[in-house]
Image (cartoon, rainbow, N blue to C red):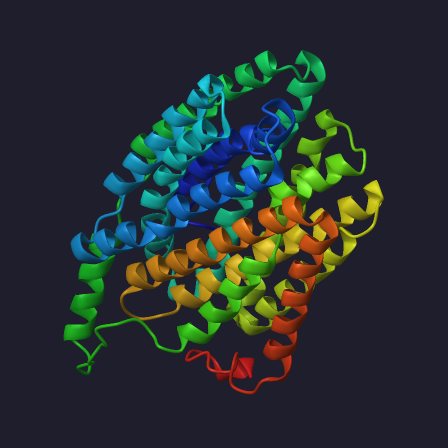
Amino acid sequence: MLKVSPNILALGWVSFFTDMATAMIKPLIPIYVVLVLNQGMDKLGYVLAITTLVSYLLRWVGGYLSDKFQVTKPLLLIGYSLSAITKPLLAYTSSWGGVAAISATERLGKAIRSAPKDMLISASAQQQNQGKAFGFHKTLDIAGEMVGGIIAFLLLRWLGQSPEFIRIMFELTIIPGIIGVLILIFFVKDTVKSSHKASLVTSSHSQPTEYPSHFDKTLWSWFVVYFLAVLFMLNDAFMVMRGSEIGIGTHWLPLLMVISALTQTLISYKIGKNLDSQGAQWLLRLSLWAGLLSTLLLFFHSPSTIILAFIFQGVFIVGGFNALRSRIGQTAQNKGKAYGMFYLGTAVAMALGNLMIGQIWEQISVYAALSFSAIGLIGLLIIALFTKGLLLNSGINHSDL
């Protein structure tokens, strides 16, 4: 049996049910915008860019507040509650603008809770087990996505694919959303403040240490590589529509995201354990390779290659995300600010990527959009592999070199 703290276990189940609700609607949004509302891929790009900006751009606020007041649970409660009550409102939208507005409001909840959640996971785990803690949490997180995707597939198959039934599916997300909030209320404890006080007491009995007023500067090289990677990587909504283009039936499309989630579930905890012993550098490079292979497979007009593309996309997501979160978790001070900056940069990169790929896809062709993604990832991988110093300053473990 895996040995993790009760707090990390409870947070994992909160994320499980919340992400179950998210995954129930995630594959439906591109279907709803493009196929039901008859909007173009550029409009889907607008929706993705707006929701991404809100989801990531404001995460520094949660990190700042967590650092300042050394509390996390109130912010988590606000964030998870907002997400739970807004998802069902998608049932009452009739334009891409309405979808964008509701989705952005729902993502605001994620923006508020993300950095505090990472802080609480880090504070609830021992320093040498940061990768294990994040890997375990990510496993339950992704398992929720997988279950939600399967539910979406079954409902589409049983109820049908009409706009009325899709709206019913939006409304049903209230159930897992509320379950997640109740677990948070009754089973999660705010340990960040007590952990902070304990570290201060320990410091007072040891040799005085002078901490910087800003986070570890060596994180910047990691951030730049990751931000560029998510800029060029296709959003899974675009990948779902690529599957639709080559003839995959609408009710099968949610299972493509399930494949990605299953891949992440199967490898996340193992990756987390290896992170603690081997460091994050190898994992970030593996993530870049997986992202490139995923994009290249989308060029082919075959359901099997689309499936493989989602498998490699799963490796890209869980690898890059866990590498960065674990690396930030190893910093001594201002973790909330570091997590906030991580999400801030991710917001800008992903939003720009969604806008550019959506425009290129709609105005030129799908192959032009795929070429943009592939060329960018190839260039980034070359830089990461052959430019000295870009990924070598871990600042933590020189065995990574």
Q: Residue furthest bottom?
A: 388
Query: Residue shown at 44%/41% (left/top)?
Result: 51
Q: Is residue 15 above or below residue 95?
A: below
State whether residue 120 appears in this view. no
State whether residue 172 appears in this view. yes
Q: Nearer the viewer, residue 205 or 12?
A: 12
Q: In which quadrant of the rendered view does residue 217 lie?
A: bottom left
Q: Is residue 244 above or below residue 65?
A: above
Residue 273 x, y percent position in the rendering: 55, 61
Residue 359 x, y percent position in the rendering: 59, 48
Q: Is residue 176 left or right of residue 149?
A: left
Q: Quadrant of the C terminus?
A: bottom right
Query: Residue shown at 66%/12% (left/top)?
Result: 159
Q: Nearer the viewer, residue 116 or 164?
A: 164
Q: Is residue 263 above or below residue 40?
A: below
Query: Residue shown at 16%/76% (left/top)?
Result: 205
Q: Nearer the viewer, residue 105 or 148?
A: 105
Q: In which quadrant of the rendered view does residue 288 lie?
A: bottom right
Residue 193 x, y percent position in the rendering: 20, 53
Residue 93 x, y percent position in the rendering: 46, 21
Q: Nearer the viewer, residue 39 or 209?
A: 39
Query: Residue shown at 76%/37% (left/top)?
Result: 245
Q: Is residue 388 left or right of residue 259?
A: left
